[in-house]
Image (tube, grey):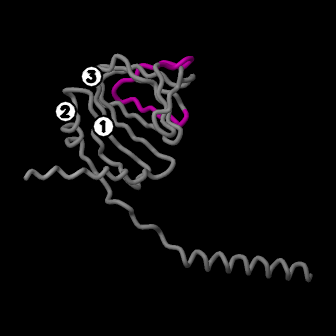
């Protein structure tokens, strides 16, 4: 019986501590305002991007772990293969068709900045034709390469850690004073 009393005491004290901890916590508050973009706003933005290869960020920046952008490729016959060590990509195809190569290995990878790799091509990847309405998830560490013409998509990028603040611009030298 003493063992049962000891077990009861331990259970009671452990749940007391948990209740105290739960009472101290509260739900978090939003760090940024929410965003609702009606279909018309997205259509207007997509039309604005179509004359050339462009991307327009909708959400993202300092302190964020998510970037949402609309990208339009007027003509992208060749593009560097990419691999991100610390971010996942999600594509939602809005218009057009593109060829997407996923997996395999980067051929002669070049680290253009920490964790961001580029290569002229992928060896041993799988090739897919992607079209309007397709949803693609590219996990971090996956080589990927996309080519297409008149192709638009929403890109959602999820970073492992929040983005750092932009580096301050170098101070400009004052213009010489003319006598």
Residue 70: image location, x then y, percent = 30, 37
The majority secondary structure of the magenta stretch comes to strand
Q: Which residues are magenta?
A: 121-141
Q: Which residue is mark 3?
A: 150
Distance in Å between CA atoms under marks 1 and 2: 11 Å
Q: Residue at x 57, y 17 (%)?
A: 124
Q: Characterize the local packing of mark 1: few (<14), some (14-19) or many (20 or more) Cα atoms within 10 angstroms.
A: many
| Relative to 50, 126 lies left or right | right
* Mark 1 or mark 2, earlier in chain: 2
Question: Is residue 176 toward the left or the right of residue 155 in the image?
Answer: left
Task: Name the residue rendered at 55%, 78% in the picture.
Answer: 24
Cβ–Cβ below 8 Å for labels 2 and 3?
no
Q: Which structural element holds mark 1?
A: strand
| Label 2 – label 3 distance at C-alpha | 11 Å
Residue designated by label 1: 70
The front one of 31 and 135 is 31
Q: Quadrant of residue 76?
A: top left
Q: Quadrant of residue 47?
A: top left
Is 68 situated above or below 111? below
The quarter in which the N terminus is drawn is bottom right
**Percent position (x, y) of residue 45?**
21, 38
On screen, residue 129 versus residue 39, left or right, reads: right
Residue 129 forms part of the magenta stretch: yes
Tell me where residue 80 appears, x and y as whole percent: 42, 23
- Label 1 and label 3: CA atoms lie apart by 13 Å
Q: Secondary structure at mark 3?
A: strand
Q: Identify the element where label 2 is drawn.
A: helix
């Amino acid at each position: 019986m003493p063992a049962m009393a000891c077990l009861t005491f331990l259970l009671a004290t452990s749940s007391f501590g948990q209740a105290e901890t739960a009472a101290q916590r509260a739900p978090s508050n939003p760090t940024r305002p929410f965003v609702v973009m009606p279909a018309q706003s997205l259509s207007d933005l997509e039309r604005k991007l179509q004359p050339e290869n462009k991307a327009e960020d909708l959400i993202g920046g300092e302190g964020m772990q998510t970037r949402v952008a609309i990208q339009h490729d007027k003509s992208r016959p060749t593009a560097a293969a990419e691999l991100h060590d610390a971010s996942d990509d999600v594509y939602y195809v809005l218009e057009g068709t593109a060829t997407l190569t996923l997996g395999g290995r980067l051929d002669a990878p070049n680290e253009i900045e920490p964790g961001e790799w580029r290569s002229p091509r992928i060896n041993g990847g799988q090739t897919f034709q992607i079209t309007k309405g397709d949803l693609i998830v590219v996990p971090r560490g996956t080589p990927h390469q996309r080519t297409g013409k008149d192709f638009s998509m929403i890109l959602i990028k999820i970073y492992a850690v929040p983005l750092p603040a932009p580096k301050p611009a170098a101070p400009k030298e004052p213009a010489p004073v003319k006598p």
